[in-house]
Image: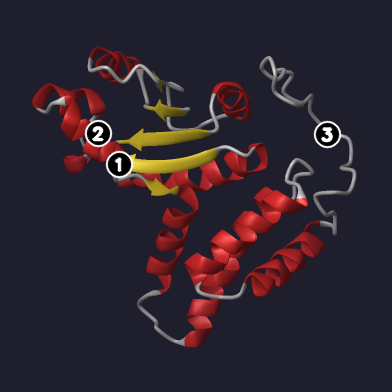
Amino acid sequence: NEAILVEGYMDCLALHQAGFTQAVAPLGTALTEAQVALLRRYCDAAVLLFDSDAAGDAAAERAIRLAVPRHLSVRLARIPGAKDPSDFLAAHDAAAFSDVLNSAVDALELRWLQTRKRFEADASGARRSEAVVEFVNLVAEACSSKAVDEIHRGLIANQIGRLLRIEPEEVHRLMRRTEKRLGGRRPTEPAAPPTTPPVTTGPADGEQA
């Protein structure tokens, strides 16, 4: 029920040869809406594997923006030594690769760690508040989709509250402020017609639309 996303052909083939047959490749680090929608038909979780810090940092934010509205849980892992998965498997066994997967960090948690690190040079309360607002703004924008219902929204607020060590009610307040800036639309309100055609990938058999 969990896909492994790698960057290219050779990585995907190496994982399948090692027994990780749930591996797929978007052929690049930038996931698309169509790819996430397709993944969601077959699983509700994914591990993203990238071989550099810069790619992983960008992937964490993109994963939140694309995966949260589609209820896809995403974790991110990095190969030790910034190696490709295929290179790692050439020198290590499947058990070692399983350890890499088990070390994967939730995308929301990783994004918060990245944000907090940028503000750590100044330990003042004001700087931490800036980090909190920046992080919550990102999540609020992802949750502005009407696909995120109140239950899912509440679960996300609880998760963010634990990460940031603040009350979920405060998370909701910050998210509502961002939504107001975006136009005031709540997830349960009708969205304006999109300017581009939506992804037409239909739900899998037995899955509710």
In this rendered view, identify the residue nearer to me: 39 or 28: 39
Which is closer to the viewer, label 3 or label 1? 1
Q: Which residue is mark 2?
A: 98
Q: Which residue is mark 1?
A: 102
Which is closer to the viewer, label 2 or label 3? 2
Q: Quadrant of the C terminus?
A: top right
- Which numbered circle lies on residue 44? none
Q: Residues within 10 Å of mark 2 (few under 14, many from 20)?
A: few
Query: Do labels 1 and 2 touch, CB within 8 Å?
Result: yes
Secondary structure found at label 3:
loop
Image location of residue 21, percent across then percent down: 35, 16
Query: Do labels 3 and 1 touch, CB within 8 Å?
Result: no
Q: CA distance from mark 3 to mark 1?
A: 39 Å
Secondary structure found at label 1:
helix
| Residue in view at x 31 percent, y 20 percent | 20
Q: Is residue 95 visible?
A: yes
Image location of residue 47, percent across then percent down: 41, 35
Amino acid type at mark 1? Asn
